[in-house]
Amino acid sequence: MHDWFKTTAPREAAKMLRVALYQPDIPQNTGTIVRLGACLGVAVDIIGPAGFTLTDKAFRRAGMDYLERASVTRHVSWEAFRSSDPIARRRIVLLTTKADLAYTDFSFRRDDVLLLGRESAGVPDKVHAEIVDRIRVPMQAGTRSLNVALACAMALGEALRQTGGFPK
């Protein structure tokens, strides 16, 4: 059984951007994204099963002392995540290398959920097909993908810029 936790960050509100990680398998990337969420006041949802526990040393090292300030919610499955409150009423935006639209050309909303897939495999076709809004980070020809934490930071930064959501 995974050792997950849930905390509430001071800035978390029903209408704020969120980041969701689909079955992450690299603890350092997840820790970095949770730290990013804590610093920017963005809640993070982790959709299980993950490939590690939140007590993993690499995860805790990447998250540093920001983990206690983060708002992290664990969901046991994709179905549990989709039906959870308030996710069920939000637009989910998938960051994927298979999208045609660049994240810089997308109009973000304040209550969007930015979904990132597994580092090793993205999201399954079933999940990909469910998501209408898909964006990508434009890259040089011949390159496969960016590190998921870097791609998350780029897209989240643009979403926060567009929606005026950066902390004051």
Image (cartoon, rainbow, N blue to C red):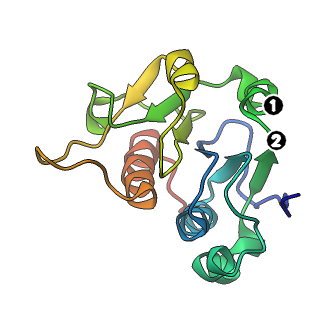
Question: Are the residues at dot 2 and dot 1 in contact (C-beta closer than 8 Å)?
Answer: yes
* Nearer to the camera, 141 or 68: 141
Neighbor class of circle 1 (other Cα within 10 Å; few <14, some 14-19, many 20+) is some
Q: Which residue is mark 1?
A: 80
Identity, as a three-letter code, of the amino acid under mark 2: Val
Q: Quadrant of the N terminus?
A: bottom right
Taking the image as shown, residue 144 lies to the left or right of residue 47, namely left
Query: Under tag 2, what secondary structure?
Result: loop
Q: Quadrant of residue 68?
A: bottom right
Q: In the image, is residue 149 above or below residue 80? A: below
Taking the spot 68% from the left edge, 78% from the top edge, the residue there is: 60
Q: In the image, is residue 29 above or below residue 105? A: below
Query: Under tag 1, what secondary structure?
Result: helix
* Nearer to the camera, 94 or 42: 94
Neighbor class of circle 2 (other Cα within 10 Å; few <14, some 14-19, many 20+) is some
How far across and how far down the image is residue 50, in percent?
69, 53
Task: Count numbered badges in the picture.
Answer: 2
Taking the image as shown, residue 21 lies to the left or right of residue 9, namely left
Q: Which residue is mark 2?
A: 76
Numbered label attached to residue 101? none
How far across and how far down the image is residue 107, in percent?
38, 28
Identity, as a three-letter code, of the amino acid under mark 1: Ala
